[in-house]
Image (cartoon, coloured by chain):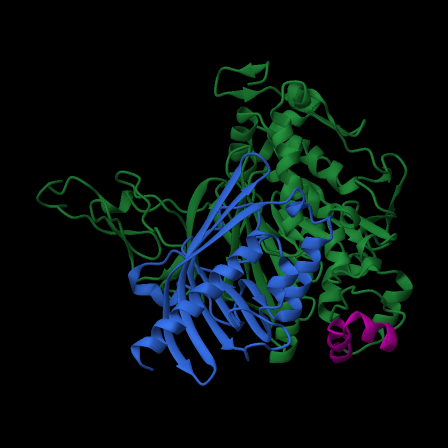
Amino acid sequence: MLAGTNSQGGVIDGDRLSSLVDSKRGTIDRRIYSDPDIYKMELERIFARAWNFMCHESQIPNTGDYFINFIGEDQVIVVRDNDGAVQVLLNTCRHRGNALCRAEQGNTKSFVCSYHGWNYGLDGRLLGIPGQKNFYRDQIDPAEWGLVKAAKVDDYKGFYFATLDPGAPDLHDFLGDVGRTGMEVLLAQGEVVAVDGVQKNIIDCNWKIAVDNLFDWYHVKISHRSAAKAGFLNPRMMMPMDQMVMLGEYGHAIGGPMISEAQQAEIDQLSDEERADIDLLSDAERAKLAPRINERRPVRKKATAEAMGPVGVRASGHPNIFPNLWISTRGMQVSLRLPRGPFETEVWWFTFMPKKFTPDQRRGAMKFISHSFGPAGLLEQDDGENWSQSTQSSRGVVSGRIPHNMQMGLGQDEVLEHPLGQKRIETRVNEHAQRWTYKCWAEWLRADDWDDLMAMRSPSPTGRI
Amino acid sequence: MDAGERLALQFDVEQFFYHEAALLDDREFRAWLDLVADDMHYWMPIRRTVTRDNLDQEFTKIGGMSYFDDDKDDLVMRVEKLEAGSAWSENPASRTRHFVSNVRILETYRDEIAVEAAFHLYRSRLNGKIDHWIGKRRDRLRRMEQGSQQEIQPGFQIFQRHIFLDQTIIRSTNLSNLF
């Protein structure tokens, strides 16, 4: 427990929080990865407040289809109700709190509690209480005891999110330009459909270590050296020198390789069909047929390019929708990093394929995807090992006091603004997005509620950074 | 097949599985690859907790997501990765023990044999990490000519290994070992 802990509710005061993340100096106090009070605050002030990714509409296409997900450690049932609407219900009976749904997914007509048989409809309404007349003597009003629902549910083009906080802004405003640009990465080749199966495994690391890695183009050459040696990764792709970072309000960010203006101008000349064809070429074929659109950078279709904006379309790094939704560069997967205490994270990988893909295209894409990420992925195998050790070392008394260095590129770059308003940093490998994520993280923890957060949040940076 | 032939086949298959397990546990991955046929399909679907009404959703199907969906080239790549020295999840090296039991020969057709077996893969990693993976394997073996150039004893190659774990969420940092 940290000194300065407020005994009323175990909340750590604002000054203390600010000192944990020194974004001017570029240092992070490692206790943010190990302190149980900070973890508790994260659940209350970040996860229970933010919009959290639930699932894609195609995962629950029919009435009664459900998928279990989490908002922090609150378990929720995401279910399609009788009107075709998506409901997000807390998975806990109003009587004794038992979990109504103990499967990960499925189809049902209603949710019947296995403890005393309270029966809830797909919209969460309490439909039946055994013994309502004989035992409760009709002194209970089922209308008052329906399942607790998420405060707001909304989707971004088929990707469902929910928030437990009625004070939250709308999803559109929460995502902002950078968050929406990030979501569009998933739609690079148009509408998508979920592939059956979410990969899930538990890594003994703090969830933030797993999040900050997604912007990290510094580790690839070292962490994933064996994947390159085995011929899985093209070594040229491992540390692209030209990088772009976009920083959005509330902590959303995109960081990674950049499509140059000249490359994008080439792409702009192509029809959607040509773009889709190039996007699927192997490295070698691509180098031959489309030499100026090099590397394996995404070639997004016209409507997506427009939605991403003139700057966003050139970002081919990984977006993070704050707090914990990683979108892969190739736009066919998202990953949730679900907190399970300071020392454990559940990593979930969802996969989506463009509806237009032919079976061959789908097979090719699936092959690359299933060999990259997930616990058996040639890349992710080694990530888990590093994240685990980075987290566990914060347990040591003296080790735990040594700050992490997050100084790469600090004060060396300039935020450039496009005439249409989108901002970006064009630079080399850097830690801008990580610093931004932690800076915003501290603001979320400091804020007492959404009004407070909206008042104190940092605007997307400008000028020297 | 008469009883004697059945007994001999059962013996050969079991001995083959023990030999294979020993190669993996002794980190003789190249020698293990020699037991893998060129048309190998090595696959581990995702298993989910489902109600009895929804048991059809328990495993993902071929073409859905999985943990492994490998052909022989992919397995060669995994072995090359293991040998690279920079595969940090396996350097320091893990200690594994592959147990195979409940071996049942389901079907034989010409030189091919369908076998189901239970497995228990134990892994001890660094000084404090212990993993157990238990499940069922559906293997297909092809009998090789005795004394063939590869001199494989007891004379099979694997051309299908479908691995069905008994756990749903993988409670391990990774799946960096071969099953």
Q: Is residue A91 above or below residue A293?
A: above
Q: How many marks?
A: 0
Q: Is residue A37 left or right of residue A440?
A: left
Q: Position of residue B72 (x, y in %)?
A: 63, 70
Q: Examine the structure image and report whether residue B51 is included in the region drawn in magenta.
A: no
| Quarter-of-image position of residue B113 | bottom left
Q: Position of residue A287 (x, y in %)?
A: 86, 72
Q: Please name whichever residue, A64 or B53, is drawn nearer the observer in this view of the structure.
A: B53
Q: Is residue A269 visible?
A: yes
Image hue for chain A? green
| Quarter-of-image position of residue A234 | bottom right
Q: Residue furthest left?
A: A134
Q: Residue furthest bottom?
A: B110
- Report the residue at 58% width, 44% height from top: A169
User: Bounds of the magenta span?
Assistant: A272-290
Q: Please name whichever residue, B113 or B88, is drawn nearer the observer in this view of the structure.
A: B113
Quarter occupied by the N terminus of chain A: top right
Q: Examine the structure image and report whether residue A273 is included in the region drawn in magenta.
A: yes
Q: Position of residue A368 (x, y in %)?
A: 67, 66
Q: Is residue A165 left or right of residue A304?
A: left
Q: Is residue A313 left or right of residue B150?
A: right
Q: Is residue B64 above or below residue A399?
A: below
Q: Which chain is blue?
A: B
Q: Please name whichever residue, A92 or A336, is drawn nearer the observer in this view of the structure.
A: A336
- Report the residue at 65% width, 19% height from top: A16
